[in-house]
Amino acid sequence: MSNTIQKTAVAAAITLTSATSFAGELGSLTSEVKINDYEKGLTKTEVTIGKGSYKLSDDYSFLFDVDKDFIKNEGEARKEGWDTKFAVAQGISPLGSFDALMNYIFYYDASWQASNGSDSSDTKKYVLQPYFSKDIILGGKDFSFGIELWAQLGNNNDESLKNKSGFETNFYLFGDLSEHWNLELAWYNFNYYHDPADEYQYQIGTEDYLTYSLPLADNVSFNVETMLYADHLPERDLTTADVHIQPQLEFKKQVNDNFSWHAGVTYEVLSWNYTDAKGTAKDRNAFDNNEFEAYLGFTIK
C-alpha cells in the first residue's frame, strides 16, 4: 500500500474517532458487502466498512462513507482500492421559502495492483456544496425540489488541484407517484477545467430513476429499478447514455428499534450503454453488459 493511501487511511480513522468524541448521537451506521458480477468477466466486490451520519449538534452533522473495493477482470491483475467520503453538513438560515444546508466534503479514491501495490493512482476532491430544498405539490402529489451548487478543487496523483476544479449547478425532483411507484429526477450542468489545457468545458446531463416496490410477505419485497443516464459535452461533441431495468428481491429484518439487517439479489434484464463521439475511430458504439448483484448488510440507528 502506498504512503499516500496509508496516510489517508490513518487520517480517516482519526476523523471518525474525533467525531465520536463530541457529545452528539449516532444518526445511522450501515455496513455491507456487495458483489457485482458483470457479463464480460468483470467482478467487483465492495465492502462498505461504514456509511452513515453522526449528529454533532442541532446545526452540524458528520457524514461518512468508507468503501474498500476488490476488482477482478479476466486477463488482468487483480486490483484493490478505496472509495471514501467525509463531510460536515451545516444547517443555515432559510433562503426565502427554501431550506438551506451547507456541506463541506472531502473525497478520496485510490486503486493499485493487489499483488505488489504497483500501478497505483489516487484522486482527491475538496467540495463546497450549498443545497436548497422545498416541498411542492405536483398533480396532487407531494414532491421535494432541490437546487445544488457545487464548487470543487481536486487532483489526480498529487498533481495540481487545478486539474479537476470547477463548479456545477444541479436540480432535483423526487417523490412518490403512488403507493408502489417512486420517481427521482436530476438535471445538471457544469464547467470543469479541460485537462491539460486551462480551458473550461461545458456539460449538461440527466440521471433519472423510476422505481416500483411490491411487498410479497413479511420482510420480503420485490422491486424494479428503471434508470436513464445521459450527458453531452458540446466541446468534444460527445454524447453518452446508459439505460437499465433491474428487478430486485430484497429481505429486511428489523431486530429491534435500533438494529436491522438486510440482503438482496438483483439482475439487469436490460443494460444498454451508448457512446457517440464524433471524430474518433469508432464514432458510435453501443453495448450491453448485464450485471448480477448480491448484497448483505446491517444498519444501526
Image (cartoon, rainbow, N blue to C red):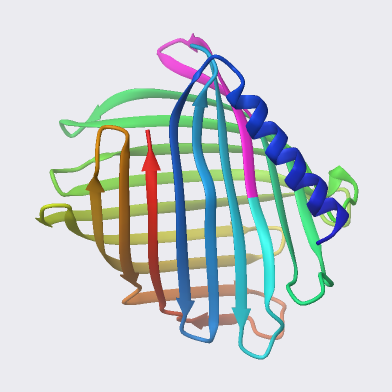
Picture residue at 71% right of the left edge, 80% below the top: 280
Residue 282 picture quarter = bottom right
Give the side of residue 203 with respect to residue 251, left or right.
right
Q: Quadrant of the C terminus?
A: top left
Query: Magenta segment range?
Result: 84-104
Quick one: which residue is furthest to the left in this view?
217
Q: Which secondary structure is most common in the magenta stretch?
A: strand
Picture residue at 38% right of the left edge, 30% below the top: 145
* x then y, percent, for residue 149: 59, 31
Q: Compared to 33, does 153 lie above or below?
A: above
Picture residue at 76% right of the left edge, 39% below the top: 11
Give the side of residue 64 with respect to residue 52, left or right.
right
* x then y, percent, for residue 267: 33, 73
* x then y, percent, for residue 180: 15, 49
* Res 286 visible: yes
Residue 292 picture quarter = bottom left
Quick one: which residue is furthest to the bottom in this view?
75
